[in-house]
């Protein structure tokens, strides 16, 4: 089985056919188990996450019934049980795949291999189909952590594209992101670098000043080290273009004078 929780909860057989996950509680139970990536989850924790503010009269019995329904849907052997609670015996999910690809892409970027990092991070982000854990009622804390991982991967992908000289292609995307997150300094750094890389240094300086004022007025804070560093990059004069080498003067080859022919002396 392959499970999906980066959006609505899904389950697919190995041949790609979907397993019918009828009912919100069944999807919530599967989402809670997939989130733990094969680790046992205590019954009381599962019951709290599945029913949230509407617990049944007998949570333990209700959970056993729900686990039975899940086993009939995805296979009895797919759900393990023991003193520690319940767990999935197979850990094939969009979450594990996303985390694997994102880790590989981020490591490649840190190693200066942007051409390797960009497609890995793009593939990781393409696995998201909507809000994480969309079917889990008590999702707030876990979803925030997953969305933070998604944000980090997104920033890394933009940084990889910048390193590959795609600044102009990123302007529209970054304009929207920074408008939605005006106080996100790492994102603003990428936006300013993209403007500079696209030849719009004056606008990049204006953006830095705008962010600096917003941080001071709304947070009472100064720009962080990375934002200050990119500002210094903007102020640094551009290197002068190399002067063309003077043209080489072609030397005229002098042909040696032909040897003079000695005329025979007149006979005396």
Image: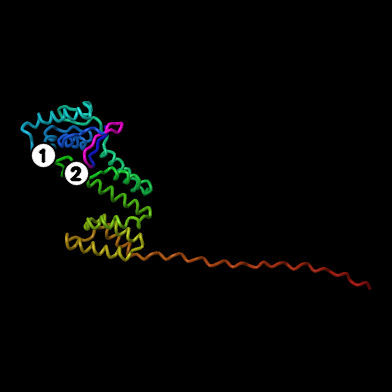
Q: Nearer the viewer, residue 70 or 170?
A: 70
Badge 1 element: loop
Q: Nearer the viewer, residue 25 or 115?
A: 25
Residue 222: horizontal and vertical position, in percent? 21, 61
Residue 29: horizontal and vertical position, in percent? 17, 35
- Checking the image for residue 143, the label placed there is 2
Crowd band around label 1 with a 10 angstrom C-alpha radius: few (<14), some (14–19), many (20+): some
160 horizontally vs 37: left or right? right
Q: Does residue 229 sit above or below 39 in this rendering?
A: below
Instruction: Identify the residue at horizontal 35%, vertical 58% (top origin).
Output: 168
Task: State which quarter of the image contains the N terminus.
Answer: top left
Residue 136 sits in quarter: top left
Q: Earlier in the sequence, mark 1 or mark 2?
A: 1
Specify the segment rendered in magenta: 7-17
Residue 7 sits in quarter: top left
Tell me if residue 139 is in the magenta stretch: no
- Checking the image for residue 52, the label placed there is 1
Q: Does residue 80 sit above or below 205 in this rendering?
A: above
């Amino acid at each position: 089985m392959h499970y999906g929780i980066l959006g609505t909860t899904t389950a697919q057989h190995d041949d790609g056919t979907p397993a019918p996950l009828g009912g919100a509680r069944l999807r919530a139970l599967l989402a809670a188990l997939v989130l733990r990536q094969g680790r046992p989850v205590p019954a009381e924790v599962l019951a709290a996450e599945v029913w949230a503010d509407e617990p049944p009269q007998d949570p333990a019995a209700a959970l056993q019934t729900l686990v039975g329904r899940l086993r009939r849907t995805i296979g009895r052997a797919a759900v393990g049980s023991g003193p520690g609670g319940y767990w999935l015996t197979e850990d094939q999910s969009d979450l594990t795949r996303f985390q694997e690809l994102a880790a590989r892409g981020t490591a490649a970027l840190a190693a200066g291999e942007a051409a390797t990092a960009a497609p890995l991070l793009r593939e990781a982000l393409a696995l998201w189909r909507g809000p994480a854990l969309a079917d889990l009622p008590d999702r707030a804390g876990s979803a925030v952590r997953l969305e933070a991982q998604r944000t980090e991967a997104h920033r890394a992908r933009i940084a990889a594209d910048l390193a590959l000289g795609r600044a102009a292609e990123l302007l529209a995307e970054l304009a929207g992101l920074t408008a939605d997150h005006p106080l996100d300094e790492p994102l603003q750094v990428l936006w300013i670098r993209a403007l500079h890389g696209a030849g719009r240094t004056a606008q990049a300086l204006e953006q830095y000043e705008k962010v600096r004022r917003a941080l001071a007025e709304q947070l009472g804070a100064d720009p962080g080290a990375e934002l200050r560093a990119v500002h210094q990059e903007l102020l640094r004069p551009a290197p002068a273009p190399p002067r063309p080498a003077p043209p080489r003067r072609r030397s005229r080859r002098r042909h040696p004078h032909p040897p003079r022919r000695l005329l025979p002396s007149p006979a005396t």
